[in-house]
Image (cartoon, helix red, strand yellow):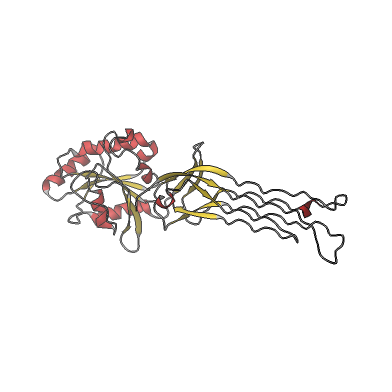
Amino acid sequence: MLFVDEIEFSVRGGRGGDGCASFRHEKFAPRGGPDGGDGGDGGSVVLRPTPHENTLYHLAGRACYEAGKGQPGSGRERAGRKGRDLVLDVPVGTVVLDAERGNVLKDLKAEGMSFVVASGGRGGKGNVRFATATNRAPRQCEGGRPGEERRLRLTLKLLADVGLVGLPNAGKSTLLSRLSRARPRVADYPFTTLEPCLGIVEASGERTFVMADLPGLIEGAHRGKGLGDRFLKHIERTRVLLHLVDCAGDGEPFEDYSVVVRELADYSDELARRPSLLVATKCEDDRSLERAAELGARTGREVRAISSATGRGLRELLDAVWPFVSEERPRPS
């Protein structure tokens, strides 16, 4: 299944049913009288967040979603049936925007929420509603009202506790595959990760949290270079970022770290201020450990040296991450 994190389509509430103009024809009711029933209200289009979806792919390929129409009324004051609501399941973390105005209508960031994006039209009144003392045989009735219609843009922001950021081949996918059951694509060439990948990480005891691996950033990503900043929105709700820096490759660790910091700042000042841990990856020999120590000296930050291949420092890293992802800390909106 393709990962789709943004989509546009139209929604339309069901049209209300027409009211009925009818008169009684019973054998023992010679004076008769109006008995036309009301039309049923149209159904509404409802968005419902669910953890069972993690992409908007299932909603792609359809231009308009329309709820059921209300049924017309009939004689003997029988009202028409209400139109059926159309409930669309979306991933938790979906932001609903008005595609024409660009304003946010609703942020569906929790399971159990629901949002009516297009209300159904009201059913028309039958002629029994128009009977008065001076108009005992009304022949007028109302037609059903059209449902609400609008064009939506849905954008998905994944709900993860920890976001992995770094240059391509910094070891993000390998770390996620080592700490969780997620199986992102891992290879020895850049941009093996083409879409975000989530994994559930088990810390000590029964403590768990969600970690997100994003495609690697390169200099100029905020201007659309490489994969651009398209996927950075998926870490806007993370509680902590892990800056992964390759200390075994040919690059200069401090410069690699600086590139990522600049790209985060260019994308969002708030994201640049997000709590973060600096992690030196692929520390499997003395040279890589020395480069990790130099990185810490130049940045003035504590550097946590790890090796996903050997398991070095992984348990200590999880212990350092846990205070940021505990339930007591609020999640950024």
The one nearer the camera, 67 or 257, is 67
Residue 117 located left or right of residue 260: right
Q: Position of residue 274 (x, y in %)?
A: 36, 42
Q: Position of residue 266 (x, y in %)?
A: 34, 34
Residue 71 located left or right of residue 105: right
Residue at point 45%, 48% (across, down): 62
Q: Position of residue 320 (x, y in %)?
A: 30, 52
Residue 90 located left or right of residue 300: right
Q: Position of residue 322 (x, y in %)?
A: 33, 54
- Quadrant (top left, top right, bottom left, bottom right) of the C terminus: top left
Residue at the left extreme, as displayed: 286
The one nearer the camera, 26 or 333, is 26
Q: Quadrant of residue 7?
A: top left
Q: Quadrant of residue 36?
A: bottom right
Q: How many marks?
A: 0
**In the rendered image of this protein, does residue 112 appear above or below residue 291?**
below
Residue at point 31%, 47% (across, down): 195
Residue 333 located left or right of residue 199: right
Residue at point 45%, 52% (across, down): 90
